[in-house]
Image (spheres, rainbow, N blue to C red):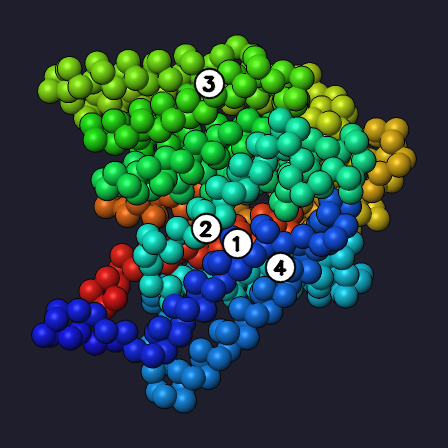
Amino acid sequence: MSVNNKKNKVVFTSNQKMCNFVSRMGMYLLLILVPLWMNKDMYTAMIGAKGKCVIFCFALMLLGIAVCYIYGFAVRERHIKFSVKNWEPMDYAVLAFGISIFLSFLGSSDKAACLTGSQGFHCGTFMCLSGIAFYFFLSRNMIPERSMWDMVFIVSDIIFAWVFCNSISFDILNMHAMIAEYQYFSYYGPLGNSNSISAYLCLLLPVGVVFFMNEKHKNNKLFYGVYVFLCVLAILAIHTEGVMIGIAVCMIFMIIYGFSSGERFIKFMEVGALAGGAMLFTSVLSVFFSERMHFSGSIASFIIKKWIGAALLLICLLLLFLYSKWRKNVQDKVLNIISYIMSGGIVAGIIVYIVYVANNFSYEYGSGRGAIWAGSIDMFKGYSVKEKLIGLGTEMIKHRLTPIVAQLSGNNNLNYANCHNNILECILCLGIIGFIAYIAVWVCVILPFFKKSRIEWSAERMAYTLSLIAYLGQSAVGNPYSLSAPMVFLFLGLLRNCIWVAKNQNRI
């Protein structure tokens, strides 16, 4: 890289441009190609189709990374440095997580199945280790621009609208003809089932919200506003509470961010008005098209039937009006105090809910998740010392978990290839070593948020942090699907890239 003094413009080397292209190609593959990919069997083979598509995408990315390094050495443009002195705690945590995955692979009973994840959701060793390799490459080589998200947002808008249309019985592309009637409203376009799209929404919604809050150009605000509006519609349409849990956890941090200053408070209220408008729109539709609409999720149904959107819209508009009148009398410190009180209230509410569920726990909880969680704990208790340390390998628990859960639930007609909880998944698949590394990664994501340096964060870094936090909340009842798990590695890489750029901005 050099600087053109005449134009005062940064000029990137050919190898830097190539590395940036590969990084963005990987981002578009995971956020555009994989979500849109589906095969002729539609719902019935969606997970397998996604898994094969992800494996292909990562293989293509690894090839691109290899070409970049070979070309860099050939032309002596070795600008990519992985010196330990430049590493952040997140790098060590991600590397440790990768090592735990490799150790569990070495100890697995069926290495071929463990490698591809063919016994589960195709989130096998190859996908995970490829995702970690891509994390390290992207985090050092992507040249960030806000515009790189435009195409992703456009595709997501289409998917969000597609999801909502499904919920009001508009069967686009005649997909319902390919699946059983009871699955009509559990299948959402190319994304697959509700659990899969739940993770997708949790990862992408905060990006649109934060970009909206930091945008001053009217046309761009409209672009992000439409995105947020459609995303809220999709959230109301899917039949899972996992996305609600993810958003609730994210809101603990989003409120602190949104109330950090007067300017952000105004934008945050505008986002609230957008969300309220989307909820109100759905409530109005439910009056005129009640026979066509299908919202079975308890929280979504409550929001729609009780007209919560109207209340939220009015509250946000009222607060905007009052703040505009008394803005000079409201200091940022007051907003900060209010934000911590509100966030503390959400934390207290979550704790109360956890205590309630624990005291009223049953195997039927969460559509049978109670039996899966109890069975997972019983399964771990029966592990050998080696298995407790390194687990059975990624996606390798089905044959041992299924009979345990079947005995607890009394349902012998299903296979249980996943724990529906990422922490339990790590403990069973990767053992105690993997569990510790997994927790370390999330500590590295969340802990910096509470440091004073947060005020200097770019909009992108805040967006990726909040996205990962939302996914963390959703993953308490969700699965590491072949659609969502690769996106987590991507978002970790994007977050690390923001840190890398901030520390090297005088050279980029």
- Which comes sooner in the sequence, label 2 or label 3? 2
Q: Is residue 498 left or right of residue 505?
A: right
As drawn, the residue found furthest toward the bottom would be: 74
Which residue position is annotated with label 1?
Answer: 32
| Amino acid carrying mark 4 in the image | Val
- Which comes sooner in the sequence, label 4 or label 2? 4
Q: Is residue 35 left or right of residue 506?
A: right
Task: Note whether 130 is above or below 208 in the view shown.
Answer: below
Tell me, yes or no, whether the two marked residues, 3 and 4, touch with CB atoms within 8 Å: no
- Residue 497, quarter of picture: bottom left
Which numbered tag is attached to residue 54?
4
Tell me, yes or no, whether the two marked residues, 2 and 3, touch with CB atoms within 8 Å: no
Q: Is residue 12 left or right of residue 100?
A: left
- Residue 459, quarter of picture: top left
Which numbered tag is attached to residue 280?
3
The residue at the point 28 percent across, 46 percent down is 457
Q: Horizontal and vertical percent for residue 172?
A: 64, 39
CA gap, disc 4 to disc 2? 17 Å
- Residue 355, quarter of picture: top right
* Helix, strand or loop for disc 3: helix
Neighbour tally class for label 3: few under 14, some 14-19, many 20 plus, Cα within 10 Å: many
Q: Quadrant of the N terminus?
A: bottom left
The residue at the point 21 percent across, 14 percent down is 322
- Which comes sooner in the sequence, label 2 or label 1? 1
* Helix, strand or loop for disc 2: helix
The residue at the point 75 percent across, 28 percent down is 368
Q: Nearer the viewer, mark 1 or mark 4?
A: 1
Q: Is residue 289 left or right of residue 308?
A: right
